[in-house]
Image: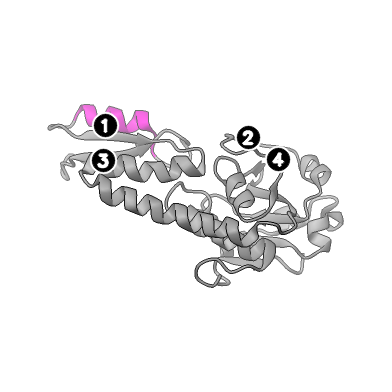
């Protein structure tokens, strides 16, 4: 960083596992020459994620452009809600890690609700923790979303037996209905950036077969079959 001599450094204090923490960045900046400005972004909800665009835009002197971008993303979310309003709301569990099992929190429950689902085991904005498999069995979701943090779909599929070997797997409603979906977590669900909007569009397809935005590709969502 000293060689790059940045004017602005963006960091986070939401998860020490996913990225360098705010405290580590602050410590490094203290020994740098110059006046680097540090902005820590810690969104927990969809609105928070969109608001981060405005915060960054304001810091960089392009607030109006950032507000236009935020409005465009909000309009896409509104379009997803419009496509799924009035449809049946399946019960949905989203898993952000497989061992230990970890339900997806923060903005993911809102993505599910926006796309016409009923999120289980996590509330909007919640910083979740590990859970027992019995909690998933008791919830008996009609749709199970598998979107591990940092794993692309191919890696998730290679490790499917971590889930499919659990007791009672075949008895889950989602498994019986062939509604277990492998999604691209890093692209659309795990990271708080503009692509969480695409995640909601993908879920409209997964939950209801509704198209919102560009067609969903197999790289974005595919059923976990044969399990």
Which label is found at residue 92? none
Q: Is residue 54 left or right of residue 43?
A: left
Separation of disc 1 and disc 2 at Cα?
29 Å
**x then y, percent, for residue 17:** 48, 39
Residue 217 seen anywhere in this rendered image of the structure: yes
Per the rendered image, the range of residues in magenta is 20-31
Q: Nearer the viewer, residue 156 or 63?
A: 63
* Residue at the spot 29% in from the left edge and 29% down from the top edge: 26
Examine the rendered structure and indicate whether residue 163 appears above or below residue 130.
below
Disc 3/disc 4 C-alpha distance (Å): 36 Å
Q: Which mark is first along the chain, 3 or 1?
A: 1
Task: Kindly check if marks 2 and 4 are in contact, taking CB atoms under 8 A apart as contact.
Answer: no
Q: Was residue 175 drawn as part of the magenta stretch in this picture?
A: no
Question: Quarter of the image containing the N terminus?
Answer: top left
User: What is the tally of numbered marks visible in this picture?
Assistant: 4
Q: Which mark is residue 58?
A: 3
Q: Tell me if residue 184 can be seen.
A: no
- Which label belongs to residue 121? 4
Q: CA distance from mark 1 to mark 4?
A: 38 Å
**Which element type, helix, strand or loop, lies under badge 3?**
helix
Q: Position of residue 107 (x, y in %)?
A: 55, 44
Residue 124 placement (x, y as % from top left): 60, 39
| Residue in the foreground of this view, choosing between 191 and 5 | 191
Question: Looking at the image, is mark 1 or mark 2 earlier in the sequence?
Answer: 1
**Mark 3 or mark 4, earlier in chain:** 3
The image shows residue 148, relative to residue 18, as above or below, that is: below
Which dot marks residue 28?
A: 1
Question: Is 190 placed above or below 218 here?
Answer: above
Circle 2 sits on which residue? Answer: 129
Q: Nearer the viewer, mark 1 or mark 2?
A: 2
Q: Earlier in the sequence, mark 1 or mark 4?
A: 1
Tell whether label 3 touches label 1 (CB within 8 Å).
no
């Amino acid at each position: 960083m000293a060689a790059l001599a940045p004017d602005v450094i963006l960091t986070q204090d939401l998860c020490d596992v996913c990225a360098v923490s705010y405290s580590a960045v602050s410590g490094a900046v203290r020994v740098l020459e110059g006046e680097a400005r540090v902005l820590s972004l810690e969104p927990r909800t969809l609105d928070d994620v969109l608001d981060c665009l405005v915060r960054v835009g304001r810091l960089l002197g392009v607030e109006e452009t950032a507000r236009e971008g935020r409005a465009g993303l909000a309009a896409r979310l509104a379009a997803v809600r419009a496509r799924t309003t009035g449809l049946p709301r399946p019960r949905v569990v989203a898993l952000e890690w497989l061992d230990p099992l970890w339900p997806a929190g923060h903005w993911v429950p809102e993505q599910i609700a926006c796309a016409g689902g009923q999120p289980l085991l996590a509330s909007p904005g919640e910083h979740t923790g590990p859970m027992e498999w019995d909690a998933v069995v008791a919830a008996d979701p009609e749709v199970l979303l598998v979107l591990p943090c940092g794993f692309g779909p191919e890696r998730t599929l290679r490790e499917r037996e971590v889930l499919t070997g659990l007791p009672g797997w075949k008895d889950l409603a989602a498994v019986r209905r062939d509604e277990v979906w492998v999604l691209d977590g890093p692209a659309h669900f795990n990271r708080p950036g503009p692509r969480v909007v695409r995640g909601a569009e993908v879920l409209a397809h997964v939950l209801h077969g509704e198209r919102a935005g560009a067609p969903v590709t197999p790289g974005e969502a595919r059923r976990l079959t044969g399990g």
